[in-house]
Image: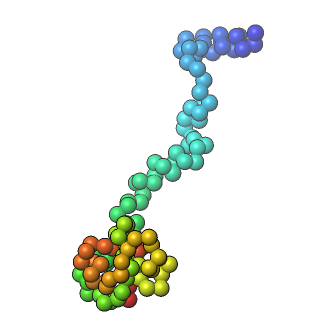
Amino acid sequence: MRRLLISMILAFLLGASAICSPINPQNQNSGKPSGNKNSAKSSNKNSTRSRGNRNRNTSTTTGTTGSQGNPNAKVWVNTDSGVYHCAGTKWYGKTKSGQYMTQKEALDKNYHADHGRACQ
């Protein structure tokens, strides 16, 4: 009975639309940010960080071989992924498919260094 009386008073004061529109608890704080943590992050994520700056060392591996460490260094190329690994690293000689070659040969065949780090 009390709810009916309150809704009638609100309808009189605010108009008939107050009774017809359902109350959405998420929209009650329309002036305040929502409690959903992911909504604020997802909207700002793309505007503040571009994917082009994600790995700044990539540009050093795509230039000439003179700026890419030792061109005669032996590397292990994972032929499935197109990534080459330097001696002494975790995946050197251990991937399922691959072959040994010099760093210069790997770059000439358009393979790229693991994590953008050329072998020294």
Q: Is residue 62 visible?
A: yes
Task: Using residue 83 as the reference point, say whether residue 90 is left or right of it.
Answer: right
Q: Quadrant of residue 82?
A: bottom left
As rendered, which of 81 and 42 lies closer to the eye?
81
* Number of marks drawn: 0
Q: Quadrant of residue 83?
A: bottom left
- The percent position of residue 57, horizontal first and vertical second, equals 37, 75
Image quarter of the C terminus: bottom left
- The percent position of residue 93, horizontal first and vertical second, equals 44, 79
Image quarter of the N terminus: top right
Please say if 43 is above or below 17: below
As rendered, which of 23 and 88 lies closer to the eye?
88
The residue sitting at 23% across, 81% down in the picture is 64
Please say if 118 is above or below 26: below
The residue sitting at 37% across, 66% down in the picture is 80
Please say if 36 is above or below 71: above
- The percent position of residue 109, horizontal first and vertical second, equals 25, 74
The residue sitting at 36% across, 87% down in the picture is 74
Furthest-right residue in this view: 1
